[in-house]
Amino acid sequence: MKTTFRMMGIADFITIANGLLGVMAVVFVLLAVEDMGKPYYEGGVLTDYIWAAMLCVMLSALGDIIDGPIARKYSKRQLLGGSLDIMSDCISFCVAPALMIFAMFGRMGEASPLWTVSLAIGCFWLIACGMLRLARFQHEKGGYVPYFYGLSSPASALILLSAAGIIWLQPSSNIGPDLTTWDCSMCWGKGQVKPYFDFLILPLLLVCGGLMISDRKMSKLKSSMQLRISSIQFAALLFAIIHAMTLTHPSDAGENLSGTSFTMFLFIFSLFLSLLYVVGVPRLVSEVSIPEENE
């Protein structure tokens, strides 16, 4: 035991806490499964467990941001940091978001088997791509290069959280069309109040997974402007989740959810900035010429 702790630095304890936050997110998802089986306004949209799971992922992302600088400044020993970081990120940004999305939109027993199986495959794809992305990152040489290849797992998780929040709150926010009479036999059936845009989450899972293992150059957010935009996106998503927790409580009984319109705006704003990073930032770094190291 003493040998193990001697190999650890200060930042390693933060990394372990990040992983445990991911485990807590999974626990909250399991607690939310019963509520997910209830009608939308009687349990689904009113559960706090889903928002608590999202909050745990956000706090883990915050810890992932600060553990690197702390390790470089205070930790003389960095023997375990890389391995711990990979395991923590896999739990918090791959496994937890995938299980969360499956619990929110899988609707076992209510949706068609085709939809449930397709969504499960999409979640498996996200986890597998996240594992490959993290393993690749472990072997990439960063140094002075201002970018890395592929979408990072935390960025993928934030995109999925933003999209899931938008889709989940859409029926109660009065934003967008009323699709309660739309027959979506592949998804949730017909004539019930539910987030009918759930079918959009499946291609998003596939795209996020593909981007993580792609050769697309993604900025490390070293410039002040990119860092500001990223900070605004993170703050908007964090506040949206906290705001949703204060509104969608079981005691409301689905009667007063008009405030979710503002929450929806925050989720949409967060998703917009995330997509701006994915689409626009690679153009800024694609023309950067970095001499390759001689092998």
Image: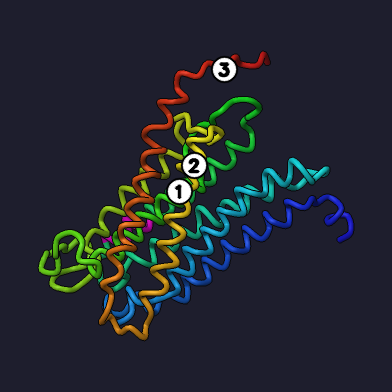
Give the residue type that dot 1 points to.
Answer: Ile
Which residue was labeled with disc 2? 228
3 and 1 marks in contact (CB < 8 Å)? no
Quadrant in which the N terminus is drawn: bottom right
Find residue 23 and report its image quarter.
bottom right
**In-front residue for pair 100/290:** 290
Q: Residue at x 53, y 41 (%)?
A: 132
Which residue was labeled with disc 1? 232
From the top left corner, tell me how far across and down residue 135 is, in percent.
Answer: 59, 40
Which residue was labeled with disc 3? 290
The mark nearer the N terminus, 3 or 2, is: 2
Label 1 secondary element: helix
Q: Residue at x 72, y 47 (%)?
A: 70
* Alpha-carbon span between mark 3 and mark 1: 29 Å
* Alpha-carbon span between mark 1 and mark 2: 6 Å
Main secondary-structure element of the magenta-colored stretch:
helix
- Give the magenta part as a residue range: 114-120
The mark nearer the N terminus, 3 or 1, is: 1
Give the residue type that dot 2 points to.
Answer: Arg
